[in-house]
Image (tube, rainbow, N blue to C red):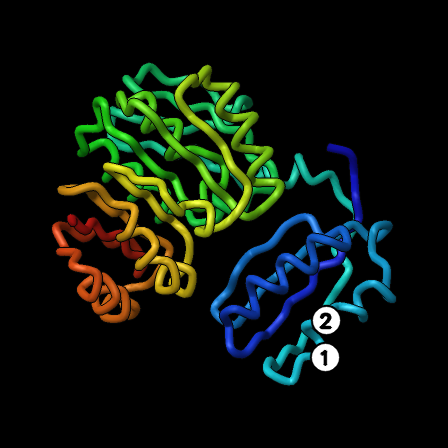
Amino acid sequence: MANHTYLEFIFNVSPLQPATEILIAELSEIGFESFVETEGGLTAYIKVGDFDQDSFEAIGLFSNDGFEISYSHKKIADQNWNAEWEKNFRPIAIGNQCYVRAPFHESKNVPYELIIEPKMSFGTGHHETTHMMLEFLLQSDLKGKSVLDMGCGTGVLAILAEKLGANSIDAIDIDAWSYKNTLENVERNRCGRIQVFQGDASLLEGRSYDVILANINRNVLLRDIPVYAACLNGGAVLVMSGFYEEDIPLVAQKCGQQGLRLEKKLQTNNWVAVKYVF
């Protein structure tokens, strides 16, 4: 990817939903490329050359009395984005079983080596949560199972699921760059049983899975847990991360309301991953 100068917009939104979802849709229409849902709302990115002030100010949500939206923005200095991502992308090793590396890292002789090109997919940011999700996968029997990787980022979880024998895998992300990056990484790892979609939990209507993986953030998880539960086959598993230890009661309450039972918890540096069974 060539050098680009980006504008970073940080939005504070109240109430979070459905305002955040609507805002992502409206920003996508006017050239915004990448989104990160945050505790307070949304961070969004657009190339300086693609930004049009009139189109931005015409966004309908800004004039809707039912929502409170404030924002700030700044220009991100021109840089080689690929070089930045490469510099910040560290390999992930899970014992002697699994090694996640970029093409520029040295190979290792392990049962499961995943090669991930770390473009601007925000799923690579939390080293701890990715590590814990991979741990849960390595402990699971996925042979012949149907798997959903929700908020797939780079597609790393979907790719490991296929290598572990999953029969069919859906990988979904709302972010356009994550969608494209996952497609590239699926091809790079020669996977043939992964379907990649751009969108949100509304795509899940009518689908069902044996295993659902969701490494997102607390607010999205709390909103979508009922949707995930509706997609779980009998005896199915829901594995989630992307939230802190202090968020566990909220997540547990929402899961309990859906008839889900906690089976296992992992924790690293205050980040948590949980496994629920249906």
| Whole-percent x, y for residue 78 in the image | 79, 47
How dense is the environment of label 2, judged by Cα within 10 Å: few (below 14), some, or many (20 and up)? few
| Whole-percent x, y for residue 111 in the image | 28, 17
The disc label shown at residue 76, or none: none
Please name the amino acid that badge 1 sits on.
Ser
Query: Quarter of the image holding residue 255?
Result: bottom left
Query: Quarter of the image holding residue 137?
Result: top left
Residue in front for this viewpoint, 127 or 7: 7
Q: Which residue is mark 2?
A: 60
Label 2 residue SS: helix
| Whole-percent x, y for residue 115 in the image | 46, 23
* Left or right: 173 as drawn, with respect to 215: right
Label 1 residue SS: helix
Q: Which residue is mark 1?
A: 63
Please tell me whether residue 99 is drawn above or below residue 54 in the rendered image: above
Q: Residue at (56%, 66%) from the top-left corner?
A: 20
Please name the amino acid that badge 2 sits on.
Gly
Q: Is residue 267 visible?
A: yes
* Left or right: 38 as drawn, with respect to 150: right
Please tell me whether residue 179 is drawn above or below residue 62 in the rendered image: above
Q: Residue furthest front?
A: 206
Contact, mark 2 vs mark 1 (Cβ under 8 Å): yes
Residue in front for this viewpoint, 75 or 260: 260
Q: Residue at (60%, 36%) from the top-left corner?
A: 119
Q: Residue at (64%, 50%) from the top-left corner?
A: 34
How dense is the environment of label 1, judged by Cα within 10 Å: few (below 14), some, or many (20 and up)? few
